[in-house]
Image (cartoon, rainbow, N blue to C red):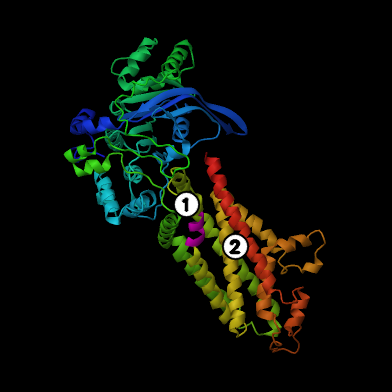
């Protein structure tokens, strides 16, 4: 990161001013250099069930200390090349990638680099400080004390001019502040390679200039900074050291920005006076491929695709600054300065911000604690997930208790009581399934970004998602069942109440897991449609609408897999089973005065509670596995 002089450079400072302010650190910068090369890279993706060649033998290189822009017309493959180079897209990719002249190990490279997409998913209900704390806890070694982590965060927020909004919720940040926060999150580990997909998208010209100036500061600290820009202004394009111009999945030009126009003019394209160089390059890359454009493509391939490593080429790279790429190691990158005593000659802040902080994999238990803490914090601030959810359970239970007041021990209104029981089942299931669906889209987007950037393991996130909603899965069914149970005068027996409460908790967990599984697999509209579409047909086979022995043999197997059937059966056993005495009868004749007769009529006679509980636990295991597979599928689909 910049030293004190650099930190005071205004957002609109010119490259020359920034460079002059960092010149005092030139010796240290020259000691740690990085180079990322890619040759003959192709990328084939499936679109509308057809294989489409997105990238065609693209070649180029990125060097540390230089800010690189990738631009071209829409559909040129700008985002695709960033996805491929960062490792976010792995399937359908061919070609050679080298990092500091060593073959790139994808897993290790992800841990020593970061990719900040255009739509950088953030948890809106966390503050900037909380977001940075979680990033530090998940990415920095546990041996670093809290005070040191806080110092790192403070320095990053100060450099990016975000100190004033550190206690503001992310959802209240402006577009430019969100962009800067996305940069700050990844700077916690100070990665030597950073990819940005359209960091100026949605920003005005002033905010765009500020963001690119921040990126230039980072590049001057010996990082490889690559960003896709859609249509840079003439002032903005001058801030970049190198550019890559793309056209229909191929590279027209890759090299220094100052040499771009002379290269195009040599190829036969006349550059108008007082014209934006970026617009000129975009117009050329938008043309149909002709002989002049083909010559540009071939010239770039000759320059980069035919590279042969020269052992003297990187003489300036410190031999003690080594990239340790080992797929069996948990440490992605280790950088040793050749002369650490030189750090004493400059500011302490600069020593801390040079690329020497390692991203050491945090233990799974630590990951689980941080992720669960984060989920609980966001959930507590979610109006739908917590406050409104609890309020609705209380209001609806009070309404149901008032409508079905004092019917639990009335032999004349047994069928009405069964209707009340079925309503309880429906509300508990959907009251816990639908909020889980609604929480998935943002959670899943954040998970994909953080997981692919190597923040934590899939197991840690999976377990945290299962455990973070436990308080709500306990509170809501408990309030709902308790209020209705006593308002409707169900049996005054704590054992029977405990049986009803236990089944309610199990059903809430089933609904929650089903919502998570469907919400993480499908988009929100599809999930909201599918969960009721799958669950409601199972209600037919619950034993409430039609008795099981009245069904044809063809449909009876569906009763054996309906979780509604086992929930209904367990609640009926808890309320009417286990030798409950005859009910009170306030009329001349009560057909279902005997609970045994009722259970026999419904094909629920026998001590079935334990069996029902066992089957529902199997459903929980099934949805747990389905949820885990949905996360794996989402990751594979993203790649």
- Residue shown at the point (54%, 49%) measured from the top left: 631
Residue 259 lies, in percent from the top left, at 32, 17
The quadrant holding residue 432 is bottom right
Outermost residue toward the right in this view: 553
Q: Which residues are the magenta region?
A: 462-468
Image coordinates for residue 527, horizontal then vertical, percent? 58, 52
Q: Residue 530, which numbered label?
A: none
| Pointers 2 and 1 in contact (C-beta within 8 Å) | no
Q: Where's the N terminus, which quadrant?
A: top left
For the point 47% across and 69% down, the residue is 391
In the image, residue 193 above or below residue 385 = above
The local crowd at label 1, few if under 14, some if 14 to 19, many if 20 or more residues have their Cα within 10 Å, is some
> The residue tagged with tag 2: helix, strand or loop?
helix
- Circle 2 residues within 10 Å: few <14, some 14–19, many ≥20: many
**The one of 9 and 191 positioned closer to us in this rendering:** 191
The reply to whether residue 573 is in sight is yes
The residue that mark 2 highlights is 510
Q: Compute the Cα span from label 2 to label 1.
A: 20 Å
> On screen, 314 above or below 509?
above
The percent position of residue 185, horizontal first and vertical second, equals: 35, 46
């Amino acid at each position: 990161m910049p030293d004190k002089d650099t930190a005071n450079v205004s957002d609109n400072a010119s490259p020359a001013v920034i460079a002059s302010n960092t010149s005092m650190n030139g010796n240290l910068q020259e000691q740690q250099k990085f180079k990322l090369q890619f040759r003959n890279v192709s990328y084939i993706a499936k679109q509308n069930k057809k294989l489409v060649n997105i990238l065609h033998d693209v070649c180029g290189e990125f060097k540390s200390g230089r800010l690189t822009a990738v631009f071209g017309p829409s559909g040129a493959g700008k985002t695709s090349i960033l996805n491929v180079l960062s490792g976010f897209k792995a399937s359908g990719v061919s070609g050679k990638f080298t990092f500091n002249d060593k073959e790139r190990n994808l897993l290790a490279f992800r841990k020593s680099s970061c990719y900040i997409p255009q739509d950088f998913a953030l948890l809106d209900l966390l503050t900037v400080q909380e977001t940075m704390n979680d990033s530090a806890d998940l990415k920095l070694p546990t041996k670093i004390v809290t005070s040191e982590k806080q110092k790192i965060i403070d320095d990053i927020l100060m450099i990016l001019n975000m100190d004033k909004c550190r206690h503001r919720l992310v959802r209240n940040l402006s577009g430019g502040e969100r962009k800067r926060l996305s940069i700050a999150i990844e700077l916690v580990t100070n990665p030597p390679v950073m990819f940005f997909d359209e960091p100026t998208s949605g920003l005005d010209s002033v905010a765009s200039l500020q963001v690119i100036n921040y990126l230039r500061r980072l590049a001057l600290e010996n990082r490889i900074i690559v960003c896709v820009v859609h249509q840079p202004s003439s002032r903005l394009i001058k801030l970049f050291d190198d550019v890559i111009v793309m056209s229909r999945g191929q590279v027209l030009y890759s090299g220094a920005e100052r040499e771009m126009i002379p290269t195009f003019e040599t190829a036969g394209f006349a550059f108008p006076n007082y014209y934006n160089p970026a617009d000129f390059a975009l117009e050329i890359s938008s043309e149909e491929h002709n002989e002049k454009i083909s010559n540009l493509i071939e010239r770039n391939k000759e320059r980069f695709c035919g590279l042969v490593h020269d052992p003297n080429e990187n003489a300036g790279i410190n031999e003690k600054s080594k990239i340790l790429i080992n797929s069996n190691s948990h440490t992605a990158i280790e950088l040793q300065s050749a002369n650490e005593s030189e750090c004493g000659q400059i500011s302490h802040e600069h020593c801390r911000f040079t690329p020497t902080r390692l991203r050491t994999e945090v233990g799974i238990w630590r990951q689980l604690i941080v992720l669960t803490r984060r989920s609980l914090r966001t959930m507590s601030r979610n109006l739908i997930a917590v406050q409104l959810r609890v309020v609705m359970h209380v209001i609806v239970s009070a309404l149901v208790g008032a409508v079905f007041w004092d019917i639990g021990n009335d032999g004349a209104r047994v069928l009405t009581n069964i209707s009340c029981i079925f309503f309880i089942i429906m509300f508990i299931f959907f009251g816990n399934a639908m909020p889980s669906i609604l929480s998935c889209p943002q959670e899943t987007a954040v998970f994909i970004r953080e997981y692919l950037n190597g923040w934590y393991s899939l197991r840690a996130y999976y377990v945290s998602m299962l455990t973070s909603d436990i308080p709500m899965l306990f509170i809501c069914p408990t309030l709902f069942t308790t209020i209705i149970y006593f308002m409707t005068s169900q049996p005054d027996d704590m054992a029977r109440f405990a049986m009803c409460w236990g089944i309610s908790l199990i059903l809430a967990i089933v609904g929650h897991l089903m919502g998570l599984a469907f919400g993480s697999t499908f988009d929100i509209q599809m999930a909201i449609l599918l969960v009721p579409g799958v669950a409601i047909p199972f209600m037919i086979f619950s034993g409430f609408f039609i008795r099981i022995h009245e069904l044809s043999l063809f449909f009876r197997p569906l009763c054996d897999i309906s979780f509604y059937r086992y929930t209904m059966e367990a609640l009926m056993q808890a309320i009417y089973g286990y030798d409950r005495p005859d009910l009170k009868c306030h009329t001349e004749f009560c057909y279902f005065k005997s609970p045994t007769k009722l259970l026999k009529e419904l094909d629920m006679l026998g001590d079935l509670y334990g069996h029902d509980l066992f089957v529902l636990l199997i459903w929980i295991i099934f949805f747990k596995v389905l949820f885990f597979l949905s996360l794996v599928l989402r990751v594979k689909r993203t790649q």
